[in-house]
Amino acid sequence: MAIRRCTLRSALPVLAFASALALSGCSGGADAESQGPPTASPSASATATPTPSVDSRPTPASSTGPARNLPKPEMPAAAKENTKAGFEAFTQYWFDAVTYALETGDTAPLKAISKPDCKICNGYIARADRVAGGNGWNVGPRWTVKGFSSTLKLDPLGQALGYFLIDESAATQYSRDGSVAKSQQALSDDAPKAIYAIYANGKWLTTQAGNA
């Protein structure tokens, strides 16, 4: 019985306080309505999530990842001429487009100057497509054409033939996880190379290239 008496006694002040609140609420109802709804404090408002910034700086390919935001290689004006010098400038530009494709995965410049049935062109395009698909990347190689020669005499297929030597830079091929899949040292190849190309509608198109 002592526990029950104590419980009732403790409840009385609570009931009295609740009654007082009810009475004061009734007497001040008009004032409460005029005050309007409470406003949210500044701290309660949602904080805007900052938009992550995108790094748009040109970044060459390296051991940490593929190239990003690189400018497309520009075809020199000479490479558009149907001359020996133009054929040579085009050959160098074609190799530059191959390097760009392998490092960035962007094959548009290479496709624009290659015949659709060019086997070596399609081989490089397939490798670049793997880069674009996130299946690894390449650092190099870069090729330098030298000792170029051509008579511009056309074969029965309408192709001009050019001979040249080439210097090739060191290069590394990386797998998706960043491990080295293949690497090669720089070399200066004394074996002559050959390129076949046609000139049509004011531009050259590679039809095949490789060892002479």
Image: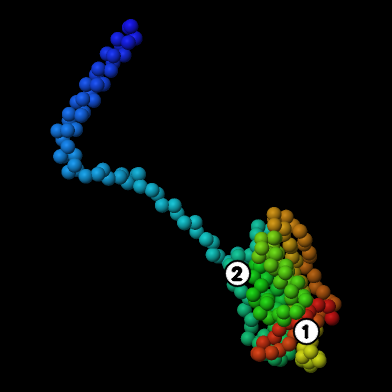
**Residue 174 pos. (x, y %):** 72, 59
Element under disc 2: loop
Q: Are marks 2 and 1 in contact (CB under 8 Å)?
A: no
Q: Between residue 202 and residue 187, name the one nearer to us.
A: 202
Q: Quarter of the image for the C terminus: give it.
A: bottom right
Q: In this view, does 198 lie above or below 187?
A: below
Residue type pointed to by label 2: Leu
Q: In which quarter of the image is residue 172?
A: bottom right
Quarter of image, res 150: bottom right
Residue position marked by numbered label 1 in the rendering: 196
The alpha-carbon separation of the residues under discs 2 and 1 comes to 28 Å
Residue count near mark 2 (Cα–Cα under 10 Å), binned few <14, some 14–19, many ≥20? some
- Furthest toward the top, the residue is 1
Q: Residues within 10 Å of mark 1 (few under 14, many from 20)?
A: many
Name the kind of residue labelled 1 in the image: Tyr
Looking at the picture, tell me which residue is in the foreground, 164 or 80. 80
The residue carrying mark 2 is: 70
Identified at 40% across, 49% down, the residue is 47
Looking at the picture, how far across and down is residue 193, in whole percent? 81, 79
User: Quarter holding the N terminus?
Assistant: top left
Residue 159, placed above or below residue 32: below
User: Where does residue 51 sit, x and y in percent of width and height?
Assistant: 47, 56
Can the viewer see residue 93?
A: no
Which tag, 2 or 1, sits closer to the chain's start?
Answer: 2
Visible residue check, residue 137: yes
Left or right: residue 161 versus residue 31 is right
Asked which colour scheme the image uses, the reply is rainbow
Residue at image position (72%, 81%) is 115
What's the residue at 22%, 21% (across, down)?
16
